[in-house]
Amino acid sequence: IKEEKKKTTAVEMASHSQVCFSSLQRISDDQYVSLNHYITGLVEEKSNVRILTLNRPKQLNALCFDMISRLLQLFLAYVEDPSVKLVILKGRAFCAGGDVPPVVRDILQGKWRLGAHFFSDKYTLNYVMATYSKPQVSILNGIVMGGGAGVSIHGRFRIATEKTVLVEEKSSVRILTLNRPKQLNALCFDMISRLLQLFLAYEEDLSVKLVILKGQGRAFCAGGDVPPVVRDIVQGKWRFGADFFSDEYTLNYVMATYSKPQVSILNGIVMGGGAGISIHGRFRIATEKTVFAMPEAELGLFPDVGASYFLSRLPGFFGEYVGLTGARLDGAEMLACGLATHFVPSARLTALEEDLYKVSSNDPTFISTILNGYTQHPHLKQQSAYHRRVLDVIDKCFSRRTVEEIISALEKEFTQEPNDWISKAITALKKASPASLKIGLRSIREGRFQGVGQCLIREYRMVCHVMKGDISKDLVEGCRAILIDKDRNPKWTPRRLEEIKENMVEQYFKRVEGEEGWDDLKLPQRKILPPSVISKL
């Protein structure tokens, strides 16, 4: 028995040496910055349970050589460890398959045997899972394709989560429905990845002429799913949040430069990230149920998802008002200021969709003709902030250079003519994060002179600084007060606007330094598109 153990150990050592050599060789080939960023699988221990998380979210957890070798090593170790009773396998997109491009590169270089090693280890892992003596639970929360099926279907338990994006095909039209109604369709990592994948695929598919985006339940989309990002920040993993925002902003950019018409049906709550996946599109349909807001400053964030682009293009200084106060707009106000392109009563949406399903051309004029047949022009409510007399005051106050001057101007107006909307605006500004207000105002002002891509790249720098928390940790505190403890009493740091100096604000707009492997947002190359396809407000 001892002799057999020695042989086994020798074989394992030789095998592990080959694995290390091959992994290092691939790291060199792919020009990875450092080994510290090549952690493709995260391991957690919870009593008698081991949780393995596939950790290549940008590649949708495609299985590389290192991941397979690591999983095989861990599964074999756990089967021998009597203290381990259960293995849980999961991933943010679960797993989109094997990482085939490196194998193809090896083949082209005449090294097909390296690919053979890859498949040999992968199939061995599949066999070990299929014959495993301990329970394996695979949580299939997202995309499961090819190799992803191999590392899950062979296991004992497979938990399929509810599809977060429902897809329907109607002739030349694709209907995407956000499907997290209990969470007001808040955008999670899986939803963003899925939407990005679908939009890019439909753009290349000549049979697709129109994409319709809508939400299940009483919300279109209430924003990004921030609590998981905050949990990552608290655990010292803010770079996971950076991956989330990188994909979200990339999706916003693809929509803003999309070569085919997108119709977003905003029949309910539209906030934050929900604005990012709709306002950049060609057509935005508001209804009497629509409630729009950009409440990020209340959470310790700032109006992002390209908001510095679309808010800065609203009439006068209405964008500063909406972005800094988080003021809620109804469907009629959205139409009046240009955030919505059409207003259709919710009772007529079903008939409108039926007519849109008949579209056989991607010419926006055809779609516009259909929408015009259903659209109405509702009157603004008496207390609306978009009446001319109110807009004059908004322009007068929100055109001021600093947040302090804006508040002072509003207070002066209120003493001269007390008004409910001014009172609400002052209260909102004084409750919001001072840091968020300062960087949010500058962001909108800079956005007036930048294209949508430049705005998103700058906002990515800003959000990374917000998550890193070197200047202020207001995002964590805001989410605690508003979303977690719900005491609605955040303790901002710095506490007052006067404490936030210009050099502190400036830091948010610079590159993130001292973070190995961090880089500015790299937006995908888009086709040379005529100006007509870029979203217009």
Image (cartoon, rainbow, N blue to C red):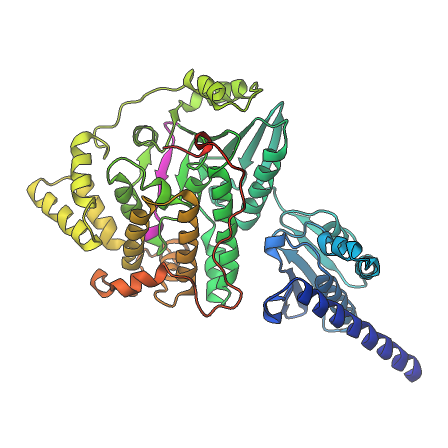
Q: Is residue 333 visible?
A: yes
35 sits left or right of 266 in the view: right
Q: Position of residue 269 (x, y in %)?
A: 40, 37
Q: Is residue 155 visible?
A: no
Check the image and report above or below for 213 versus 77.
above
Q: How many circles with numbers are drawn on the protein? A: 0
Q: Position of residue 161 (x, y in %)?
A: 63, 46
Where on the picture, by quarter, is residue 434?
bottom left
Q: Position of residue 214 (x, y in %)?
A: 50, 33
Residue at image position (70%, 62%) is: 67
106 sits left or right of 292 in the view: right
Residue at image position (43%, 37%) is: 280
Magenta span includes 291: yes
Check the image and report above or below for 487 versus 292.
below
Check the image and report above or below for 274 versus 11.
above
Check the image and report above or below for 453 versus 111.
above
Where on the picture, by quarter, is residue 318?
top left
Residue at image position (54%, 35%) is: 177
Considering depth in this image, is 290 or 181 the residue closer to the camera? 290
Residue at image position (74%, 55%) is: 105
Magenta span of residues = 287-297
